[in-house]
Amino acid sequence: MSGEDGNTKGVPAVVKQESAKDQPFVIVIPIYEGVDLLDVAPPYEIFQWMGEKWGERKVEVYLAAEQREQPIFSRDRFQLTPHKTFDEIPRADLVWAPGGNPPDLGREMANPAFLGFLRRIAKKADWVTAVCGGAFLLAEAELLDGHEVTTHWAFLPCFERYPNVRVAPGYPRYVRSGNRVTGGGISSSIDESLGLVILIAGEDVAREVQLMTQYFPDPPVTGDIPGATVCALPPRTAGAAG
Protein backbone atom coordinates (compact mmCIF):
# COMPACT_ATOMS: atom_id res chain seq x y z
CA MET A 1 0.00 0.00 0.00
CA SER A 2 1.42 3.34 -0.98
CA GLY A 3 0.97 6.64 0.82
CA GLU A 4 0.22 9.95 -0.85
CA ASP A 5 3.95 10.60 -1.21
CA GLY A 6 4.56 7.29 -2.95
CA ASN A 7 6.36 5.64 -0.01
CA THR A 8 5.68 1.94 0.52
CA LYS A 9 4.04 0.66 3.68
CA GLY A 10 6.40 0.53 6.64
CA VAL A 11 8.76 3.17 5.28
CA PRO A 12 8.30 6.50 7.12
CA ALA A 13 7.54 9.48 4.96
CA VAL A 14 10.19 12.17 4.84
CA VAL A 15 8.73 15.41 6.13
CA LYS A 16 10.49 18.50 4.86
CA GLN A 17 11.38 20.80 7.73
CA GLU A 18 10.86 24.43 6.89
CA SER A 19 13.98 26.37 7.75
CA ALA A 20 14.04 29.94 9.01
CA LYS A 21 15.16 31.09 5.56
CA ASP A 22 12.00 29.61 4.03
CA GLN A 23 9.82 31.77 6.29
CA PRO A 24 9.33 35.52 5.85
CA PHE A 25 11.04 37.79 8.35
CA VAL A 26 7.99 39.38 9.96
CA ILE A 27 8.17 42.87 11.48
CA VAL A 28 5.19 44.27 13.36
CA ILE A 29 4.68 47.88 14.43
CA PRO A 30 1.70 48.14 16.80
CA ILE A 31 0.02 51.54 16.43
CA TYR A 32 -2.55 53.47 18.42
CA GLU A 33 -4.39 56.78 18.42
CA GLY A 34 -1.90 59.58 19.09
CA VAL A 35 1.21 57.69 17.97
CA ASP A 36 4.16 59.76 16.73
CA LEU A 37 4.36 59.59 12.93
CA LEU A 38 8.17 59.66 12.87
CA ASP A 39 8.19 56.70 15.23
CA VAL A 40 6.33 54.70 12.58
CA ALA A 41 7.05 55.94 9.05
CA PRO A 42 10.89 55.89 8.94
CA PRO A 43 11.30 52.36 10.32
CA TYR A 44 8.48 51.13 8.08
CA GLU A 45 10.27 52.44 4.99
CA ILE A 46 13.76 51.39 6.06
CA PHE A 47 12.60 47.85 6.83
CA GLN A 48 10.84 47.73 3.45
CA TRP A 49 14.09 48.76 1.77
CA MET A 50 15.87 46.04 3.75
CA GLY A 51 13.45 43.57 2.22
CA GLU A 52 14.29 44.76 -1.28
CA LYS A 53 18.05 44.59 -0.75
CA TRP A 54 18.34 41.48 1.42
CA GLY A 55 18.51 38.28 -0.60
CA GLU A 56 18.39 35.90 2.37
CA ARG A 57 14.71 36.13 3.33
CA LYS A 58 11.51 37.82 2.31
CA VAL A 59 10.56 40.67 4.65
CA GLU A 60 6.99 41.49 5.65
CA VAL A 61 6.23 44.67 7.61
CA TYR A 62 2.83 45.17 9.20
CA LEU A 63 1.12 47.94 11.09
CA ALA A 64 -1.10 46.27 13.68
CA ALA A 65 -3.79 47.54 16.02
CA GLU A 66 -6.65 46.28 18.18
CA GLN A 67 -9.12 46.82 15.34
CA ARG A 68 -9.19 47.67 11.64
CA GLU A 69 -12.71 49.07 11.36
CA GLN A 70 -11.65 52.68 11.89
CA PRO A 71 -8.52 54.57 10.86
CA ILE A 72 -5.99 55.58 13.46
CA PHE A 73 -4.66 59.12 13.61
CA SER A 74 -1.15 60.04 14.65
CA ARG A 75 -0.43 62.77 17.18
CA ASP A 76 -0.46 65.34 14.38
CA ARG A 77 -3.62 63.84 12.78
CA PHE A 78 -1.99 61.87 9.97
CA GLN A 79 -4.28 58.98 9.07
CA LEU A 80 -2.88 55.47 9.42
CA THR A 81 -4.57 52.24 8.41
CA PRO A 82 -3.43 49.05 10.15
CA HIS A 83 -2.84 45.99 7.98
CA LYS A 84 -3.83 43.50 10.66
CA THR A 85 -5.34 43.26 14.11
CA PHE A 86 -3.32 41.97 17.04
CA ASP A 87 -5.18 38.66 16.81
CA GLU A 88 -4.16 38.29 13.15
CA ILE A 89 -0.43 38.36 13.98
CA PRO A 90 0.54 34.88 15.23
CA ARG A 91 4.27 35.55 15.34
CA ALA A 92 6.91 38.15 14.54
CA ASP A 93 10.67 38.17 14.26
CA LEU A 94 10.81 41.81 15.32
CA VAL A 95 8.36 43.97 17.23
CA TRP A 96 8.80 47.76 17.22
CA ALA A 97 6.89 49.76 19.85
CA PRO A 98 6.48 53.45 18.88
CA GLY A 99 6.00 56.39 21.23
CA GLY A 100 3.28 58.98 21.09
CA ASN A 101 1.44 61.85 22.66
CA PRO A 102 1.92 61.42 26.45
CA PRO A 103 -1.79 61.07 27.36
CA ASP A 104 -2.32 58.55 24.55
CA LEU A 105 0.85 56.70 25.45
CA GLY A 106 -0.29 56.58 29.05
CA ARG A 107 -3.62 55.11 27.94
CA GLU A 108 -1.92 52.28 26.07
CA MET A 109 0.43 51.65 28.99
CA ALA A 110 -2.71 50.69 30.93
CA ASN A 111 -4.34 48.81 28.05
CA PRO A 112 -4.39 45.04 28.73
CA ALA A 113 -4.92 44.24 25.04
CA PHE A 114 -1.89 46.25 23.92
CA LEU A 115 0.38 44.99 26.68
CA GLY A 116 -0.86 41.44 26.23
CA PHE A 117 0.00 41.57 22.54
CA LEU A 118 3.50 42.80 23.31
CA ARG A 119 4.08 40.05 25.86
CA ARG A 120 2.77 37.35 23.53
CA ILE A 121 4.66 38.42 20.44
CA ALA A 122 7.90 39.08 22.35
CA LYS A 123 8.12 35.48 23.59
CA LYS A 124 9.35 34.18 20.24
CA ALA A 125 10.65 37.36 18.63
CA ASP A 126 14.32 37.65 17.76
CA TRP A 127 14.24 41.39 18.42
CA VAL A 128 12.10 43.36 20.88
CA THR A 129 12.51 47.06 20.13
CA ALA A 130 11.05 50.49 20.80
CA VAL A 131 11.74 54.10 20.03
CA CYS A 132 11.06 57.23 22.05
CA GLY A 133 8.26 56.75 24.61
CA GLY A 134 7.50 53.33 23.15
CA ALA A 135 10.10 52.05 25.61
CA PHE A 136 7.52 52.52 28.36
CA LEU A 137 5.09 50.21 26.60
CA LEU A 138 7.79 47.53 26.79
CA ALA A 139 8.68 48.50 30.35
CA GLU A 140 5.05 48.32 31.45
CA ALA A 141 4.82 44.86 29.88
CA GLU A 142 7.92 43.92 31.94
CA LEU A 143 9.93 43.29 28.78
CA LEU A 144 12.86 45.57 29.67
CA ASP A 145 13.65 44.16 33.11
CA GLY A 146 17.39 43.60 33.42
CA HIS A 147 18.20 45.60 30.29
CA GLU A 148 19.93 48.92 29.60
CA VAL A 149 17.72 51.32 27.68
CA THR A 150 17.21 54.85 26.45
CA THR A 151 14.26 57.00 25.38
CA HIS A 152 13.37 60.61 24.54
CA TRP A 153 15.34 62.93 26.83
CA ALA A 154 12.16 64.40 28.34
CA PHE A 155 10.99 60.97 29.50
CA LEU A 156 14.22 59.66 31.01
CA PRO A 157 13.14 60.49 34.61
CA CYS A 158 10.11 58.23 34.12
CA PHE A 159 12.34 55.17 34.33
CA GLU A 160 12.48 55.74 38.08
CA ARG A 161 9.17 53.88 38.06
CA TYR A 162 10.96 50.74 36.83
CA PRO A 163 13.73 49.78 39.24
CA ASN A 164 14.69 46.70 37.21
CA VAL A 165 15.52 48.76 34.12
CA ARG A 166 18.94 50.41 33.69
CA VAL A 167 19.17 53.76 31.90
CA ALA A 168 22.10 54.31 29.54
CA PRO A 169 24.13 57.43 30.31
CA GLY A 170 23.78 60.48 28.10
CA TYR A 171 21.43 60.73 25.14
CA PRO A 172 22.38 57.94 22.72
CA ARG A 173 20.49 57.59 19.47
CA TYR A 174 19.83 53.96 20.33
CA VAL A 175 21.01 51.27 22.73
CA ARG A 176 21.28 47.53 22.27
CA SER A 177 20.98 45.25 25.29
CA GLY A 178 20.85 41.61 24.26
CA ASN A 179 17.94 41.33 21.85
CA ARG A 180 16.37 44.53 23.18
CA VAL A 181 16.97 47.73 21.23
CA THR A 182 15.59 51.10 22.34
CA GLY A 183 15.95 54.49 20.71
CA GLY A 184 16.00 58.11 21.78
CA GLY A 185 13.47 60.73 20.76
CA ILE A 186 11.39 60.51 17.58
CA SER A 187 13.99 61.07 14.81
CA SER A 188 16.20 58.44 16.46
CA SER A 189 13.94 55.93 14.72
CA ILE A 190 16.00 56.40 11.55
CA ASP A 191 19.33 55.57 13.19
CA GLU A 192 17.84 52.74 15.21
CA SER A 193 16.07 51.02 12.33
CA LEU A 194 19.18 51.31 10.15
CA GLY A 195 21.22 49.87 13.01
CA LEU A 196 18.76 46.97 13.16
CA VAL A 197 19.29 46.36 9.45
CA ILE A 198 22.96 45.80 10.25
CA LEU A 199 22.08 43.33 13.02
CA ILE A 200 19.55 41.47 10.87
CA ALA A 201 20.86 41.59 7.31
CA GLY A 202 24.44 42.81 7.62
CA GLU A 203 26.39 45.99 7.02
CA ASP A 204 26.44 45.68 3.22
CA VAL A 205 22.64 45.67 3.08
CA ALA A 206 22.52 48.57 5.53
CA ARG A 207 24.84 50.60 3.30
CA GLU A 208 22.55 49.97 0.33
CA VAL A 209 19.56 51.10 2.37
CA GLN A 210 21.46 54.17 3.53
CA LEU A 211 22.26 55.03 -0.07
CA MET A 212 18.74 54.48 -1.39
CA THR A 213 17.21 56.60 1.37
CA GLN A 214 20.11 59.08 1.06
CA TYR A 215 20.52 59.13 4.81
CA PHE A 216 23.62 61.26 5.26
CA PRO A 217 22.38 63.69 7.94
CA ASP A 218 23.68 67.24 8.09
CA PRO A 219 21.11 69.20 10.12
CA PRO A 220 20.84 72.93 9.33
CA VAL A 221 20.66 73.85 13.01
CA THR A 222 22.40 72.66 16.15
CA GLY A 223 21.39 72.85 19.76
CA ASP A 224 21.80 71.33 23.18
CA ILE A 225 19.56 68.89 25.01
CA PRO A 226 18.55 70.59 28.27
CA GLY A 227 17.83 67.42 30.21
CA ALA A 228 14.79 66.74 32.39
CA THR A 229 14.15 66.17 36.06
CA VAL A 230 10.39 65.58 35.99
CA CYS A 231 8.63 62.69 34.23
CA ALA A 232 6.60 63.89 31.22
CA LEU A 233 4.20 60.93 31.33
CA PRO A 234 0.87 60.92 33.18
CA PRO A 235 0.81 59.10 36.53
CA ARG A 236 1.21 55.36 36.23
CA THR A 237 -1.98 53.36 36.55
CA ALA A 238 -1.81 50.97 39.51
CA GLY A 239 -1.71 47.36 38.52
CA ALA A 240 -1.09 48.02 34.85
CA ALA A 241 1.78 45.55 34.67
CA GLY A 242 1.32 41.86 35.13
Image (cartoon, rainbow, N blue to C red):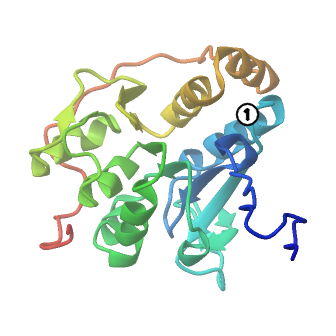
The residue at 26%/44% (across/down) is 155
Residue 100 visible in this rendered orientation of the protein: no
Q: Is residue 90 left or right of residue 81?
A: left
The number of numbered discs placed on residues in the rendered structure image is 1
Q: How far across and down, in percent of the image, does residue 142 sit? A: 24, 56
The residue at 60%/27% (across/down) is 194
Camera-side residue of 69 and 121:
121
Camera-side residue of 81 and 208:
208
Q: Bin the neighbour count of mark 1 within 10 Å (Cα to Cα): few under 14, some 14-19, many 20 and up.
A: many
Q: In what element is the residue under mark 1?
A: helix
Q: From this view, report whether residue 167 is shown above or below residue 105.
A: above
Q: Is residue 51 left or right of residue 224?
A: right
Q: How far across and down, in percent of the image, does residue 193 sit? A: 57, 34
Camera-side residue of 158 and 9:
9
Q: Is residue 169 left or right of residue 137?
A: left
Q: From this view, report whether residue 110 is shown above or below residue 23.
A: below
Q: Is residue 58 left or right of residue 38?
A: right
Q: Quadrant of residue 176?
A: top left
> Which residue position is annotated with label 1?
50
The residue at 71%/50% (across/down) is 23
Q: From this view, report whether residue 149 is shown above or below residue 124.
A: above
Residue 125 visible in this rendered orientation of the protein: yes
The amino acid pointed to by label 1 is Met
The C terminus appears in which quarter of the rendering? bottom left
The N terminus appears in which quarter of the rendering? bottom right
The residue at 64%/40% (across/down) is 42
Q: From this view, report whether residue 145 is shown above or below residue 1.
A: above
